[in-house]
């Protein structure tokens, strides 16, 4: 089982180049997570994990997040069938952002609005334009 | 010039499916931004923009962020040469996360630790392992 360490007491070099997994959580105990498709590389969504969600994700091999709107652990796909099978988890230099690669199950969707991913609108000079 | 709207007063449908660009900023006035390489699709970094950084990015075609450590507008690459030329900006369903596609200039790097991108370590059962 992967151990989560505490950044306090670690040096900058240990955090940035060491092998201790020590996510830096924000004031709400969360870290942002970029979810990408393991086969296409596309960014599917951005969500948040707390300590428990990280542990559940690693233990089960399926993405778990912290739902900020419902304030509860969120096993992605538990109701929709859009389970995200974990392929890879990475953390950035200062350990305050995570990227996961997943294989979406069910109908392959991800976004609650009904799109394959959440970033279906491009920002243009005239506002947002759907572009999928 | 792209106008930034205020989400308050907009319906859920207007926010999720409309054409008004209305980023939802957090308590610190920031929105997380996933920066990807326009050619390879790889996730380079995760940073934050405020209202001004979004406007500067769109106006200049070069990524600007808000530096949380320095508490100032951060024109990425202004000192390192690692300017990020903007190719595309997208916003997600509830407009609280942005993805940009960029072409890194200078030596093509991105991360202050010296790697091509910030996600150079994989989370494994034995802790973090460098994997670039």
Image: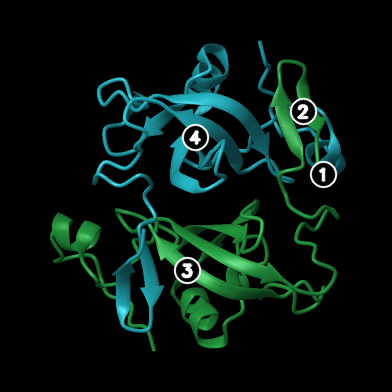
Chain colours: A cyan, B green
List x then y, in percent, for residue A39: 56, 37
Name the side, left or right, on which B79 lies relative to A125: right
Tell me the chain of label 3. B
Q: Which mark is residue B128?
A: 2
Task: Kindly report the distance in space between the C-alpha atoms of the residues bearing marks 3 and 4.
Answer: 28 Å
Q: Is residue B15 above or below residue A108?
A: below
- Calculate the distance from the C-alpha at mark 2 to the C-alpha at mark 3: 31 Å
Mark 2 or mark 3, which has the lower sequence index?
Answer: 3
Chain of the residue where label 2 is placed in the rendered structure: B
Q: Nearer the viewer, mark 1 or mark 3?
A: 3
Question: Do residues under tags 1 and 3 come within 8 Å of each other at their CB atoms?
Answer: no
Label 1's element?
helix
Which residue matches tag 4? A29
SS type, badge 3: strand
Query: In the image, which is nearer the foreground, mark 2 or mark 3?
Result: 3
Disc on the earlier residue, 1 or 4? 1
């Amino acid at each position: 089982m992967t151990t989560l360490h505490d950044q306090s007491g670690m040096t900058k070099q240990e955090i940035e180049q060491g092998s201790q997994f020590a996510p830096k959580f924000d004031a709400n105990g969360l870290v942002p997570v970029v979810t990408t498709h393991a086969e296409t590389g596309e960014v599917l969504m951005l969500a948040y994990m707390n300590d428990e969600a990280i542990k559940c994700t690693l233990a089960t091999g399926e993405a778990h997040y912290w739902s900020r709107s419902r304030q509860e652990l969120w096993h992605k796909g538990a109701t929709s069938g859009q389970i995200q099978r974990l392929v890879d988890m990475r953390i950035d230099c200062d350990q305050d952002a995570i990227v996961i690669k997943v294989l979406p199950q069910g109908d392959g969707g991800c976004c609650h609005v009904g799109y394959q991913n959440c970033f279906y609108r491009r920002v243009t000079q005239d506002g947002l334009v759907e572009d999928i």
